[in-house]
Amino acid sequence: MSIEQNIIDLRNELRRHNYNYYILDNASISDYEFDIKLKELQALEDANPEFFDANSPTQRVGGAITKNFKTTVHDFRMYSLDNSYSKEDLLDWETRIKKMVDGKVQYTCELKYDGASMNLTYENGKLLRAVTRGDGVQGDEVTANIKTINTVPLQLKGDFPDRFDIRGEIILPIQGFLKMNEERIANEEEPYRNPRNTASGSLKLQDSSEVAKRPLECLLYSIKGNNLNISTQYEGLEKARAWGFKVPKEAKLVNSIDEVLEYVEYWDKERHNLPYEIDGVVVKVNSLFQQDELGFTAKAPRWAMAYKFKAEQVSTRLNEITYQVGRTGAITPVANLEPVELAGTTVKRASLHNADQIEKLDIREGDEVFVEKGGEIIPKIIAVDLTKRPENSVSTSYIQFCPECETHLERLDGEAKHYCPNYNGCPPQVVGRIQHYISRKAMDIEGLGGETVALLVKEGLIKDYSDLYELTVEQVIPLERMAKKSAENLINGVEASRQIPFERVLFALGIRYVGETVAKKLAKHYKSIDALMFASILDLVTVDEIGERIAESVVDFFSSEQNRKIVERLKTFGLQLEISADKLANQTEILKGMSIVVSGVFETLSRTELKKLIEDNGGKVSSSISSKTTYLVAGDKMGPSKREKAEKLNVEILSEQDFLNLLK
């Protein structure tokens, strides 16, 4: 078998497994086996770039950077829908329809997914582009980000039209949303407010590899095009499913408005059992011929109507306002409520966010408050029932002292939250920082969890994360639920963390505003903790994408004598506090200050390898050509528009060999 045929066969096999898993919900291979085959395909593609395919399964991992999203005009306008909120609205709509069309009218009922609208264009069975709804006439092209979503087929199967558009909704399933928020809260980051906004925001992230980390899905509901050989909306849904799209099976074909109302009533009750959020039902005239007859108003199709569910809301008593302290010292006020059932769950607590929110609502202990979920997973207090406010009600005074260590709180200019400045003596801050240090994206210490950290601090065995490296099995065994084997695993996990690379150690230190990406940039620029410790604010803000707020936070962290002592201890324990010699050996400043665009297919190196070479030699990889571009490295099959733009802006075009000679 030829290499090309081997690559084609692997791609087809992986697409089939992907379809079985994500569309049919029927895995035909284990995750491990899938990953092995994907790595095999990746290795073959890297070694044989002439067989590159933009729609290969390997392209789902992302990696493309989009600084400016291209505005693209839709081939077929994306209209909004008229809304209805009652049975009477739907009956009036039916009356208008029957005045305009002859014969029996059937309806397709579909769930109204609460996400971000998307238009996908396919040509010859391959994804050509993905464009957001925008203003309905034109939107932003986000193809690189959409390719990372597993439920968006990159290659269709079956008997599909040569070219067509298909519309759908990008959604974030509830479980995935909750897991993302758990990680953000653990990292002392503000949790996302709701799945819809999070899904929508994901589409405009510049780094598609970050989009790939989010468990987004694409649910399809409408096909547009010429010569589609489809006569009804329901037939279109079935065909889309057969071509490989994820089309929820809850859609139903009905014969009357009474059946529509039964469908609406059923899903108003059952929607909380779905894995994703819906905010209503969309009803469409089933016949596409009748749809054409009905046409459009200036804003919406006459043949469709969205029935919106009422946002769920209950009232309950606010018993007490308490305050939580995070690892950075941020104070979060919490409303402790009389337990109440809301949207299928028992609600006992709701975040009040900050002092400004409390003042805005004039919320007080003892108030009867309205709690809503609506489009939110996290319950929120939306108002106070002033008619039930007790006569002896007292305005809420935001606390002035830390509820854990009684230190006077601070609120900096421009900050919404209050902070406890007792960095080294406030227990939740101490425990929170160590929990962050051991977390998966930081030092990833196996055998050590958050509860064990709290026990270690409580028992006085550790006061900061540098103390972890002096723990012994004998010290750990007496802890609750700790046996000899688990104690040994804990110590071995701490020992193994000495090999974690510098950028992750820097992230683990827990410097406010220094997340994973910022830590990588700082590590690459300064190359050692010593160089970073002595950097000034003026020096730091010259680093790519490091602003004044981050710079001030870094300087503030290292101005603390206690923090400097901890770093010195970590050095003595052999942690990686500088970029390794191997990495340094491959890095230069040859391309410092240069912005370079890479485009096309290359003979010797993959595009990923070329981009890494640029970054390792001090350059910046850019995705689009501008007047600031230094070079365009051009390979085979590069689009003519990039060459034309480079020539127009007098950007020097290098071949692969020219670029490699430049590095020599």
Image: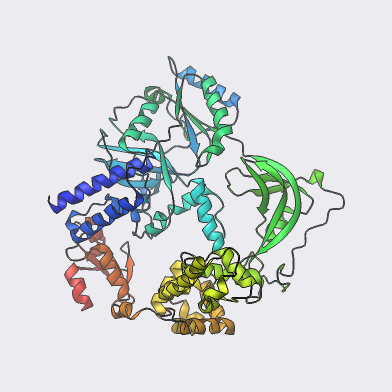
| Residue 588 seen in render | yes
Q: Is residue 31 left or right of residue 519?
A: left
Give the residue displayed 38% in from the left and 43% down from the top.
22
Spot occupied by residue 594 in the image (x, y as percentages of width and height): 31, 73
Give the residue displayed 44% in from the left and 37% down from the top.
79
Is the C terminus in the top left, top right, bottom left or bottom right quadrant?
Answer: bottom left
What colour scheme was applied to this rendering of the protein?
A: rainbow
In front of the other: 592 or 267: 267
In front of the other: 628 or 607: 607
Figure label count: 0
Residue farthest to the front, as pictured:
484
Task: Report which quarter residue 385 is drawn in.
Answer: top right
Residue farthest to the left, as pictured:
2
Q: Is residue 520 left or right of residue 650?
A: right
Give the residue displayed 32% in from the left and 80% down from the top.
584
Whether residue 259 is situated above or below residue 481 in the rendered picture: above
Task: Report which quarter residue 237 is drawn in.
Answer: top left
Residue farthest to the right, as pictured:
392
In front of the other: 371 or 624: 371
Spot occupied by residue 236 in the image (x, y as percentages of width and height): 36, 30
| Residue 655 seen in render | no
Spot occupied by residue 449 in the image (x, y as percentages of width and height): 53, 64
In front of the other: 267 or 550: 267
